[in-house]
Image (spheres, rainbow, N blue to C red):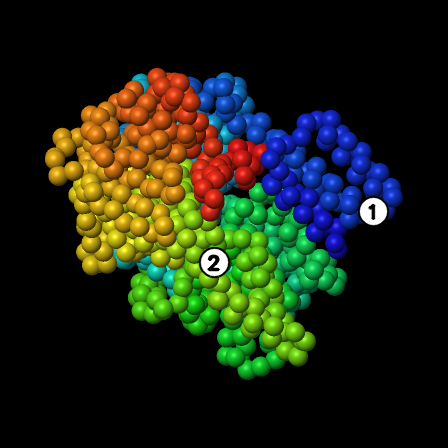
């Protein structure tokens, strides 16, 4: 039994390696595994086999990615539209599987955007397209989402967009499973139900969450029912159970007429067919594959008609997931799925000796307690009332709504009218369901996220507390969880260093987090994109939570450009700063409508002190500026005899004026380069007067703006400055000790992975 766990551990461990070894190393490990088998050291042998598999998978995944040397480049490619294209009004995003002998660099799958075009993209279409491609790459921030790892897990070889050219043409069109999914989506979108209910119907039928609004998603998370409104392991497991029961009942009925059918086998076969169909409707997404593997293992165990321990079945499912998705451990869904299954297998059997409702409540509590740990470690929202809400929501959605969605999909090829009626019946229930979750109290007095910074000590203590809570009654030491939990609550807030400045990796944009011992300031929030994606909510907020920040003392938005202010609404949706300073008027009508916050303009001369650190605005003055870049808030930070300057996007004309400000402290220890290193900024006199020891360029990797300009970097180099770039280093953290010494941490180097 332990061999499968050792094999899985070997596969998953490779994902933590900074680089992959070559062929000679693989041959050596292969020989070592054979030798270990001969010596009957099975655990070590299977660990080696797992490592060998993980390395080979990683080498294959990297082998069909676009080479760095030709990124970005234009290519003429032929391929098929796969999956469900998602449109946001002016752009369609879709996956494109390449085919033909002219595939460049052995690429397999592309993730493309097509802007402002009239063609309707349908799965199964074969196109000839002129595309601009880049090697898969994402931002790297502590606590941030690893987009590059996600692309590798999806099998994406390159990302890019379709060029506007007459070379683009459709070649052919054939039917596929995704074509059927597309027809189902079009039918569901035409239903006469509420938009939110329509979005949930689409998610439950096809696993397509593209129509779920951020507001609805937040309510679902707050109520702890997100797992119920997507095709999850819970739904696939319940569908498997229902179809097994139906198959077994059919076999028993036919047995009454003398047919020699075995209930177990008929139930298992029907269950397998139905769950595969349901998974296909979800496009065999990675979470669906994970759930399908677990169900298949359970069905195989049942068909073997042998006693298989829970530990072995769990381990085989774990090994299956590891082989399909060796990087699964980097997703919170993996830990939540296997955590829930572990709780059901090992803890629930001890809770079924009481009354029906007490049993259900205890099951919900046990699963919630098990999942509390990954929720806190991944800084996901904690729904404190989810055990009570799920008592009603799970049977409702799983036994009344999901079967209707599944039956509608099955009957669609035979009768669109019947399937439409079934979907409407599901949609009407979902309208009531949404009303119910909107009525769930938010319990604002309880924290929604872990209030502690992510450190080894905190994680181990949380594991120990949860483990002690879940021990059976009467076990010695069980109540040690109480003093340990109190110890966590008594951990003093604040940071151990007097000053920490982190320039986050937000692509072509800017966001800087400044932390003193007891205060936190955010300067700019990065950009926002269509469909609600915002670096404020996706990068800045997760970073703050990872640092244990629950209160944001000040937010400064230098000016209104999207790459500086675009993430503001997203950040304000999760943090409410005590003070908000802006360089110019921002369109935050939705935030201000809620009456949660008011803003003030930055003004030169304003100064305040936090924990012996001095903050000063040096610009703008009352004098008006014709350019919004020149309206940027310029923030100076002074600690001991050192100075940090955040100038936003000011240009040379304001730089000259700034040099005459008597508050300007020089030389500068850390300068975030004005306007990302553009030619319009970092003038000669400005660079010479500031004489910065460290200069950070916050830019997008190989962005078409070409920042930083070569003439600018040479100017700083001649001055003797040390240059840093978030595009190359990821997030950059500058930490000052009590003695005034400075240390620098690069996120890409600190958490190096073989795909970076």
Rate crowding at label 1 as few (under 14), some (14 to 19) or many (20 or more) other CA atoms within 10 Å.
few
Tell me what residue is drawn at x 44 percent, y 27 percent: 722
Q: Is residue 721 left or right of residue 47?
A: left
Camera sees residue 322: yes
Q: Is residue 375 left or right of residue 35?
A: left
- Residue tagged by mark 2? 452
Q: Earlier in the sequence, mark 2 or mark 1?
A: 1
Tell me what residue is drawn at x 32 percent, y 23 percent: 688
Structural distance between the alpha carbons of marks 2 and 1 = 42 Å
Residue 585: numbered disc: none
Of the pair 611 and 476, the residue shown nearer to us: 611
Helix, strand or loop status at disc 2: loop
Q: Position of residue 52 (x, y in %)?
A: 70, 37
- Residue tagged by mark 1? 41
Numbered label tally: 2
Looking at the image, do the residues carrying marks 2 and 1 touch, with CB atoms under 8 Å apart?
no
Q: Position of residue 195 (x, y in %)?
A: 28, 54
Tell me what residue is drawn at x 39 percent, y 21 percent: 719
Of the pair 85 and 746, the residue shown nearer to us: 746
Rate crowding at label 2 as few (under 14), some (14 to 19) or many (20 or more) other CA atoms within 10 Å.
many
Farthest left residue in view: 623
Seen in the picture, residue 378 relative to 307 is either above or below; the reply is above
Helix, strand or loop status at disc 1: loop
């Amino acid at each position: 039994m332990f061999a499968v766990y050792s094999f899985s551990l070997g596969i998953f461990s490779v994902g933590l390696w900074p680089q992959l070894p070559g062929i000679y190393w693989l041959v050596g490990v292969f020989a070592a595994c054979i030798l270990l088998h001969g010596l009957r050291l099975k655990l070590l042998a299977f660990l080696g086999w797992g490592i060998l598999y993980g390395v080979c998978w990683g080498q294959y995944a990297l082998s069909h990615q676009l080479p760095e040397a030709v990124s970005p480049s234009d290519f003429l490619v032929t391929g098929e539209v796969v999956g469900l294209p998602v449109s946001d009004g002016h752009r369609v995003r879709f996956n494109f599987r390449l085919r033909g002998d002219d595939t460049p660099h052995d690429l397999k799958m592309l993730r493309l955007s097509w802007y402002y075009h009239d063609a309707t993209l349908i799965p199964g279409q074969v196109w000839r397209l002129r595309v601009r491609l880049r090697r898969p790459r994402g931002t790297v921030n502590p606590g941030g989402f690893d987009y590059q790892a996600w692309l590798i897990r999806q099998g994406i070889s390159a990302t890019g967009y379709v060029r506007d050219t007459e070379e683009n043409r459709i070649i052919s069109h054939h039917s596929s499973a995704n074509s059927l999914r597309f027809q189902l989506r079009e039918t569901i979108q035409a239903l006469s139900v509420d938009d939110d209910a329509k979005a949930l119907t689409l998610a439950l039928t096809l696993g397509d969450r593209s129509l779920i609004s951020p507001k609805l998603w937040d309510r679902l998370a707050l109520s702890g029912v997100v797992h119920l409104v997507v095709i999850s392991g819970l739904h696939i497991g319940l569908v498997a159970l229902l179809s097994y029961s139906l198959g077994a009942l059919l076999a028993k009925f036919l047995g009454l007429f003398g047919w020699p059918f075995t209930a177990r086998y008929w139930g298992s076969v029907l269950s397998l067919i139905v769950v595969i169909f349901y998974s296909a409707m979800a496009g065999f997404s990675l979470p669906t594959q994970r759930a399908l593997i677990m169900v298949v293992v359970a069905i195989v165990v049942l068909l073997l008609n042998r006693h298989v321990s829970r530990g072995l079945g769990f381990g085989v499912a774990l090994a299956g997931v590891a082989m399909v998705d060796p990087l699964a451990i980097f997703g919170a869904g993996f830990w939540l799925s296997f955590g829930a299954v572990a709780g059901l297998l090992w803890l629930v059997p001890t809770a079924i000796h009481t009354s029906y409702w007490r049993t259900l409540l205890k099951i919900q509590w046990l699963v919630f307690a098990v999942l509390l740990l990954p929720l806190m470690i991944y800084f996901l929202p904690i729904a404190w009332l989810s055990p009570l809400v799920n008592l009603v929501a799970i049977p409702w959605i799983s036994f009344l709504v999901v079967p209707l969605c599944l039956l509608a999909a099955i009957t669609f090829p035979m009768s669109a009218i019947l399937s439409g009626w079934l979907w409407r019946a599901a949609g009407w229930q979902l309208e009531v369901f949404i009303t119910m979750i909107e009525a769930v109290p938010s319990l604002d007095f309880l924290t929604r996220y872990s209030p502690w910074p992510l450190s080894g000590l905190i994680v181990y203590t949380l594991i120990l507390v949860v483990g002690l809570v879940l021990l059976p009654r009467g076990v010695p030491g069980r109540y040690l969880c109480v003093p340990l939990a109190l110890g966590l609550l008594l951990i003093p807030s604040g940071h151990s260093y007097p000053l920490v400045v982190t320039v986050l990796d937000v692509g072509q944009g800017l966001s800087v987090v400044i932390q003193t011992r007891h205060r936190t300031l955010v300067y700019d929030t990065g950009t926002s994109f269509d469909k609600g994606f915002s670096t404020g909510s996706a990068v800045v907020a997760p970073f703050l939570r990872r640092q244990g920040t629950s209160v944001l003392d000040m937010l400064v938005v230098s000016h209104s450009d999207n790459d500086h202010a675009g993430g503001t609404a997203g950040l304000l949706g999760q943090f409410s700063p005590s003070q908000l300073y802006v360089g110019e008027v921002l369109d935050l009508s939705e935030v201000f409508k809620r009456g949660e916050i008011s803003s003030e303009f930055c003004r030169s001369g304003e100064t305040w002190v936090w924990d012996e650190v001095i903050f000063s605005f040096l610009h703008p003055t009352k004098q008006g500026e014709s350019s919004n870049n020149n309206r940027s808030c310029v923030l100076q930070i002074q600690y001991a005899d050192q100075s940090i300057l955040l100038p936003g996007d000011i240009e040379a004309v304001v730089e000259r004026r700034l040099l005459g400000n008597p508050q300007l402290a020089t030389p500068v220890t850390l300068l975030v380069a004005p306007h990302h290193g553009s030619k319009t900024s970092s003038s000669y006199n400005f660079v010479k007067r500031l004489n910065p020891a460290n200069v950070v360029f916050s830019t997008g990797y190989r962005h078409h703006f070409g920042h930083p300009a070569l003439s600018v970097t040479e100017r700083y180099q001649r001055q003797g400055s040390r240059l840093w770039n978030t595009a190359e280093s990821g997030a950059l953290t500058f930490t000052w000790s009590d003695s005034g010494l400075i240390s620098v941490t690069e996120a890409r180097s600190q958490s190096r992975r073989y795909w970076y």
